[in-house]
Image (tube, rainbow, N blue to C red):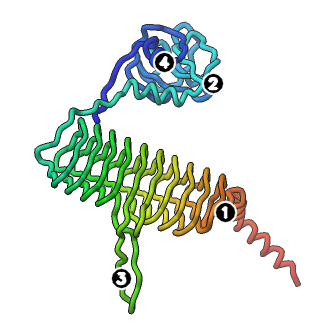
């Protein structure tokens, strides 16, 4: 989808967001940005009123220099916590400034869905079914029996293999691959280079030779999931590898065969989940975290970056380290590691006094 820009007055934007505001009604706002990137026409947000000193002030109010090029507070707007003192500034007042800023960004930078088409260089097999207003880009390959729901966009170079199913209003970015029989729900985003449904890493040895175990299951990705660039989700051996609704998976993540990930997980880059692991809902995984095969991780678990989970984890645990343990224990261990040289020197002094 193409992203475009729209302009709103402060009053119009406040009406669209259903927020009270202060300041110049007719101020033209052209883009969303962060506080450190403000320029005329920008809309930023402030998570806490304690950061008010970082907001440029309008003319006529005592000013401090906060930017390399001072920005006039008359030319910008800021979404601030409800109850913040306006002090004559262009403010929109929200109980959740971050959420309001996200909505403002969507209004100021909307996406424009292209008109449905199948590019002449695309290759379509037999019995391919396309819903209304589906856009199929250059060099796309759709194998026999592929089904794509209404409003979905398949960018250049994607490959959808036999009987793959794509839901409605999905966007699949260039060079992504969805292999045979895999099912993608509605409003799913697959970033470039992602591979859905590759064979799981299943082998057994006989007489020192690796023998491949056929992987005949599927991958099922539920609604509102996002899969990052160059992330791989392997098919199950017999049943389904499942990514449940609302989960967001970063770039370069490996999800092995038969894994089940619960709703609304957040998994950061370069992490890996071993085969047949079962993950509860609302998991948070820091970057480069690993979960070994066949473990069960509860609901609302947080694993800090570079954790390695090797055993079952109960609900609402926060873990870190290798192997992972409750984060309070892990932090104590880390603190001791940094004192090892000091402790070793003290030990040597004690030993030197011994007879």
Q: Which residue is mark 2?
A: 49
Mark 1 nearby-residue class (10 Å; few <14, some 14–19, many ≥20): many
Contact, mark 2 vs mark 4 (Cβ under 8 Å): no
**Disc 4 or 1, which lies upstream in sequence?**
4
Alpha carbon of mark 3 to alpha carbon of mark 1: how far?
36 Å
Alpha carbon of mark 4 to alpha carbon of mark 1: how far?
45 Å
- Which residue of the protein is positioned furthest toward the bottom in this rendering? 207
Q: Which residue is mark 4?
A: 77
Alpha carbon of mark 2 to alpha carbon of mark 4: how far?
15 Å
Alpha carbon of mark 2 to alpha carbon of mark 3: how far?
63 Å
Contact, mark 2 vs mark 3 (Cβ under 8 Å): no
Q: Residue at x 46, y 27 (%)?
A: 103
Foreground label between 2 and 3? 3
Foreground label between 4 and 1? 1
**Disc 1 or 2, which lies upstream in sequence?**
2
**Disc 2 or 4, which lies upstream in sequence?**
2
Q: Which residue is mark 1?
A: 325
**Disc 2 or 3, which lies upstream in sequence?**
2
Mark 2 nearby-residue class (10 Å; few <14, some 14–19, many ≥20): few
Numbered disc 2: secondary structure? helix
Q: Which mark is residue 211?
A: 3
Numbered disc 3: secondary structure? strand
Q: Residue at x 39, y 50 (%)?
A: 228
Mark 4 nearby-residue class (10 Å; few <14, some 14–19, many ≥20): many
**Disc 3 or 1, which lies upstream in sequence?**
3
Q: Residue at x 38, y 58 (%)?
A: 219
Q: Is residue 225 above or below residue 54?
A: below
């Amino acid at each position: 989808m193409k992203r475009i820009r729209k302009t709103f007055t402060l009053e119009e934007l406040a009406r669209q967001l259903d927020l009270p505001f202060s300041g110049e009604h007719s101020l033209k706002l052209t883009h969303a940005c962060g506080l450190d990137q403000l320029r005329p026409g920008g809309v930023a947000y402030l998570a806490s009123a304690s950061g008010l000193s970082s907001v440029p002030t309008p003319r006529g109010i005592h000013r401090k220099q906060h930017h390399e090029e001072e920005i006039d507070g008359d030319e910008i707007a800021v979404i601030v916590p409800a109850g913040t003192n306006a002090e004559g500034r262009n403010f929109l007042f929200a109980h959740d400034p971050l959420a309001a800023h996200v909505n403002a960004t969507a209004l100021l930078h909307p996406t424009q869905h292209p008109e449905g088409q199948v590019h002449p260089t695309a290759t379509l097999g037999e019995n391919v079914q396309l819903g209304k207003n589906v856009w199929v880009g250059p060099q796309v390959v759709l194998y026999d029996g592929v089904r794509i729901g209404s409003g979905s966009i398949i960018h250049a170079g994607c490959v959808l293999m036999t009987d793959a199913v794509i839901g409605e209003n999905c966007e699949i970015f260039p060079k992504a691959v969805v292999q045979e029989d895999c099912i993608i729900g509605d409003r799913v985003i697959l970033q470039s280079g992602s591979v859905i449904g590759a064979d799981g890493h299943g082998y057994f040895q006989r007489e020192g030779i690796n023998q491949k175990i056929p992987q005949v299951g599927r991958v099922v990705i539920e609604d509102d999931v996002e899969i990052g660039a160059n992330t791989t989700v392997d098919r199950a051996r017999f049943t389904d590898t499942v990514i449940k609704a609302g989960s967001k998976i970063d770039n370069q993540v490996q999800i092995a065969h038969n894994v089940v990930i619960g709703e609304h997980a957040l998994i950061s880059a370069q992490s890996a989940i071993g085969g047949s692991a079962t993950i509860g809902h609302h998991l948070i995984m820091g970057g480069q975290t690993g979960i070994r095969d066949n473990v069960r991780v509860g609901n609302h678990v947080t694993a800090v970056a570079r954790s390695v989970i090797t055993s079952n984890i109960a609900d609402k645990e926060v873990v870190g380290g290798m192997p992972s343990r409750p984060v309070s224990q892990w932090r104590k261990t880390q603190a001791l590691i940094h004192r090892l040289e000091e402790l070793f020197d003290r030990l040597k002094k004690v030993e030197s006094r011994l007879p």
